[in-house]
Structures are given as C-alpha cells and as structure tokens.
Image (cartoon, rainbow, N blue to C red):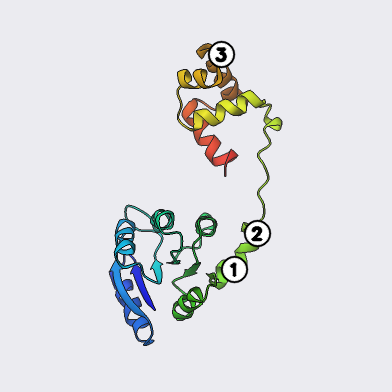
Amino acid sequence: MKIAVVDDDKLVALSLKTILESTGHITVAAMGSSGSEAIEIYREHQPDVMLMDIRMEGMTGIDAGELILNEFPEARILYLTTFSDDEYIVKALSMGAKGYILKQDFEGIAPALEAVMRGQNVFGEKVMTKLPELMKPREEYDYASHGINDKEREIMELVATGLSNKEIAARLYLGEGTVRNYISNLLEKLALRDRTQLAVYYYTEVKK
C-alpha cells in the first residue's frame, strides 16, 4: 500500500513513517507539511491513501482535501488529528473523506489505512460516539418566526453572495431604493447593524 503523510509537525510525520513502514506492507511514498503541499503531492504520487492532519499553517487539511477530491473524486483521504471538533467531522463526512481518526488512537492507524483500502469508512471511537447526533437532519431556518417574507429572504441570500444594491435591483427588477428599504427592514427584524452582519448572519444562522 502506497500512502502519503501530510502533517505540519515534522516529528509526528517521521514517527508515522517509521511506525507504518515497520508493518512491512505500507510504503510512505511522500511527505508534506501543509495543505498546499498535500495537493502537489497527490497530483504527483496519487497514493492509495493520503493520511493528513487538519489544522496546519495556511491552507487547512480540510480545504486541501476538498480541492483534491474535486480534481480526483476517487481519492482516499484519511484525516488524522488531535481535534474532534464537530464542524470538522461533519465537513469531512460531507466532502467524501474516508475517515477521521484521532492521533491518540496511534495503534489503530495502520488498521484504519487497511480498512480504507478495503472500501470502508473509518472513524475513531470518540468520533463514532458523536456521529448519530451530528448526522441528524438539521431543521430548516424558520423565516416566518422572524417575520421575513419571501422577497426579503431572496434579498438576504443575494446580499450574502456579495451583490451590491444595484446588482440586486437589476436581478430582481426592483428599484435601488426599494432594495435599500428591504435591507433596512431585514436589519431591523434581525437586530443587525449593516449588510456585512446580515451576510455573516445568513451563513452562521440560516445556512449552518
């Protein structure tokens, strides 16, 4: 089995290489220390599995994994991290990663790689206990409870994509003054200060 290891702690990466190659059937074909390096390594070596840390300087492992999977949909990415943050678990699952295990599960890393090669998804024990709750369908945002009508909802979404009042007006065949009024109403209903806060609210509360 040919794998690549990406971890910004070089001591950890070297330790992983030593431990994994001692099995006799795992070869570490390449090593990197950043998300951007991970992308180049995958393009060059196309390993059977990429074992990658999540929190790294610059581009995270999650961002790198997403780009790799966009370019190579069959890529097998197994995340190895000291963090068990819910948002990372959900993101790793939704983007198509093959697993997410904690560095504390050191003895289980080689078996996890073998399971991924057999087509299984692998999650550490701590992560597994969280999955049922994390994968529950999320409730739809209740616009009506905030007094937001369909047109205001549409304008909020367009503000969140970065469109100006002029662009929104052209898109919805409205006057710029009308768009400004809609946005003012939204800010008042949601107790927000400006359109930047409205965009942040949309992504943190509506689309979460």
Residue 178 shows which numbered tag? Answer: 3
Q: Is residue 191 shown to the viewer in this render?
A: no
CA gap between label 1 and label 3 equals: 50 Å
Answer few, some or many: residues within 10 Å of disc 2's Cα (few below 14, many 20 plus, some between 14 and 19).
few
Q: Quadrant of the C terminus?
A: top right
Q: Residue 124 placed where, x, y %? A: 53, 71
Q: Residue 199 placed where, x, y %? A: 50, 32
Residue under the point 54% across and 59% down: 93
Q: Secondary structure at mark 2?
A: helix
Q: Is residue 75 left or right of residue 132?
A: left
CA gap between label 2 and label 1 equals: 10 Å
Q: Is residue 39 shown to the viewer in this render?
A: yes
Q: Relative to 51, is 178 above or below?
A: above
CA gap between label 2 and label 3 equals: 42 Å
Q: Amino acid at mark 3?
A: Thr
Q: Relative to 114, is 66 above or below?
A: above
Q: Residue 106 placed where, x, y %? A: 44, 78
Q: Which residue is mark 2?
A: 133
Q: Relative to 60, is 200 above or below?
A: above
Q: Which residue is mark 1?
A: 128
Whether the residues at callouts 2 and 1 have beta carbons within 8 Å, the answer is no
Q: Amino acid at mark 1?
A: Met
Q: Give the label, 2 or 3, closer to the camera.
A: 3
Q: Give the label, 1 or 3, closer to the camera.
A: 3
Q: Secondary structure at mark 3?
A: helix
Q: Relative to 179, is 22 above or below?
A: below
Residue under the point 32% across and 52% down: 58
Whether the residues at callouts 1 and 3 have beta carbons within 8 Å, the answer is no
Comes first in the chain, label 2 or label 3: 2
Comes first in the chain, label 2 or label 1: 1
Where is residue 76, by image quadrant? bottom left
Q: Is residue 21 left or right of residue 196?
A: left
